[in-house]
């Protein structure tokens, strides 16, 4: 039998166990985030994605949070990670079609900004990405879909932001906006269709 003081210590013990569990998840998340950030840094350096060092801490923090959350949010983030890496393969001639070949950044009028092209490229990639969202049929399907969508958006943004470092502000926002908008648009449409089908 437990003594009275053992019973009174039970909430404190539960709190210590919970704290140790959460710290363990943060530690594991930091290890995963370090690995992802290292790969992203290597890819950013290899493909010349601009001043990527300035945004590496954001990638690290995003992946610590995603790993700590786990579940469908982390699975969505892995898909977003792959799509984010694909953004590095998008040539600047596609994102900035009015520039002369070989021009990266210029403010002298020899290269114009093309936010519309970035929005279009990002939207196409975002729509393709949204097709990988988990379907319904599981307990809490709508909430899980939303969580996976948020994880996917966070995953792709944490990587695509490095490509955006090589673009002008309007183009960077266009690319990110297209990616996020594409995922949210198709993801939201799929969720609405599933809810209508469930009611029918």
Image (cartoon, rainbow, N blue to C red):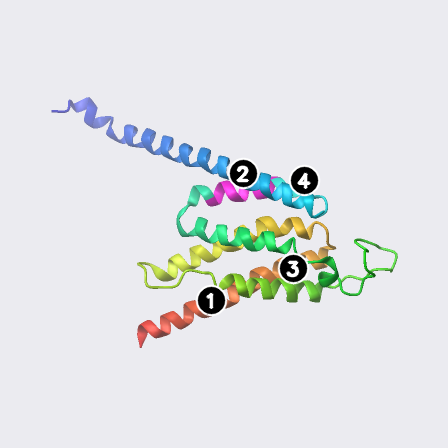
- Upstream in sequence: badge 1 or badge 3: 3
Mark 3–mark 2 CB contact (< 8 Å): no
Dot 1 falls on a residue whose secondary structure is helix
Query: Distance between the Cα atoms at labels 3 and 4?
Result: 19 Å
> Looking at the picture, how far across and down is residue 33, in whole percent?
52, 39
Circle 3 sits in a helix, a strand or a loop, which is it?
helix
> Residue 195 in the image: x percent, y percent?
36, 70
In the image, residue 8 sits, relative to residue 144, either above or below, namely above
Examine the structure image and report whether residue 127 is included in the region drawn in magenta. Answer: no
The residue that mark 1 highlights is 188
Residue at image position (70%, 66%) is: 117
> Quick one: which residue is furthest to the bottom in this view?
200
Residue matched to label 3: 175
Which residue is under mark 2? 35
Hey, which quadrant is residue 119 in on the image? bottom right
Q: Position of residue 104 (x, y in %)?
A: 79, 54
Dot in front, 2 or 4 = 2
Residue 60 inside the magenta-drawn segment: yes
Q: Residues within 10 Å of mark 4 (few under 14, many from 20)?
A: some
Circles 1 and 3: CB distance less than 8 Å?
no
In the image, the segment drawn in magenta is: 57-66
Query: Decide: marks 3, 4 in contact (CB < 8 A)?
Result: no
Q: CA distance from mark 2 to mark 4?
A: 15 Å
Q: Which quarter of the image is occupied by the N terminus?
A: top left
Seen from the viewer's position, the closer of residues 191 and 77 is: 77
Callout 2–callout 1 Cβ contact below 8 Å: no
Residue identifier under label 4: 53
Sooner in the amino-acid sequence: mark 2 or mark 4: 2
Residue at x 72% of width, y 55% of height: 169
């Amino acid at each position: 039998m437990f003594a009275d003081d053992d019973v009174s210590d039970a909430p404190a013990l539960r709190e210590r166990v919970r704290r140790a569990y959460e710290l363990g998840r943060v530690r594991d998340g930091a290890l995963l985030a370090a690995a992802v950030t290292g790969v992203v840094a290597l890819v950013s350096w290899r493909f010349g994605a601009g001043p990527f060092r300035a945004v590496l801490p954001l990638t690290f923090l995003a992946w610590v949070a995603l790993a700590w959350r786990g579940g469908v949010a982390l699975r969505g983030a892995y898909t977003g990670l792959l799509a984010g890496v694909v953004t590095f393969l998008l040539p600047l001639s596609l994102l900035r079609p009015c520039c002369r070949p070989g021009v990266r950044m210029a403010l002298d009028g020899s290269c114009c900004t093309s936010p519309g092209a970035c929005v279009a490229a990002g939207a196409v990639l975002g729509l393709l990405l949204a097709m990988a969202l988990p379907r319904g049929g599981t307990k809490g399907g709508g909430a899980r879909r939303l969580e996976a969508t948020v994880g996917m958006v966070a995953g792709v943004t944490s990587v695509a932001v490095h490509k955006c470092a090589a673009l002008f502000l309007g183009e960077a926002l266009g690319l990110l906006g297209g990616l996020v908008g594409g995922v949210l648009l198709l993801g939201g449409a799929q969720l609405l269709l599933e809810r209508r089908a469930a009611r029918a």
